[in-house]
Image: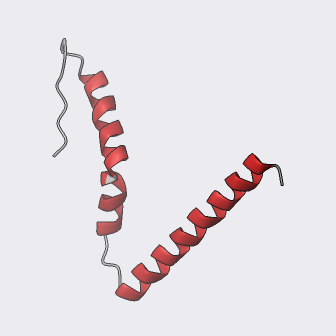
Amino acid sequence: MVSVSVKDNNVDQALRVLKKKMQREGLFREMKLRRNYEKPSEKKAREKAEAVRRFRKMERKKRDRDGY
């Protein structure tokens, strides 16, 4: 469970901290995914596409780091 304490009645800062914590834990992404039902085949295709994107990004970073 995510909790944030408000210091000196500074609600704006507490909201920023809360949003950052929720982003870090992936709650925004999960809420977006749960908005509508996702068929198992769609979920499988989405996860595969995400894996391909992650792999390509990793390879791109590796290439840039090694100088190829």
Q: Residue at x 68, y 61 (%)?
A: 59
Horizontally, residue 32 falls left or right of residue 11, namely right
- Colouring: secondary structure
Write down the quadrant of residue 44 in the picture: bottom left
Q: Looking at the image, which residue sits at the far bottom? A: 41
Looking at the rendered image, the quarter that the C terminus falls into is bottom right
Please determine whether, in this image, residue 66 is positioned above or below residue 18.
below
Percent x, y for residue 3? Answer: 17, 36
Residue 31: where, in percent of width, then height? 30, 59
The one of 61 and 23 positioned closer to us in this rendering: 61
Q: Residue furthest front?
A: 66
How many callouts does the rendering have? Answer: 0
Q: Hey, which quadrant is residue 32 in on the image?
A: bottom left
Q: Nearer the viewer, residue 55 or 30?
A: 55
Residue farthest to the right?
68
Q: Is residue 41 above or below residue 56?
A: below
Answer above or below: position of 25 versus 13: below
Q: Residue at x 49, y 81 (%)?
A: 45
In-image side of 31 versus 42 (left or right)? left
- Residue drawn at 15 percent across, 46 percent down: 1
Q: Where's residue 67, x and y in %?
A: 82, 49
The residue lying at 46 percent from left, 74 percent from top is: 47
Q: Position of residue 55 (x, y in %)?
A: 60, 66
- As drawn, 68 above or below 56: above
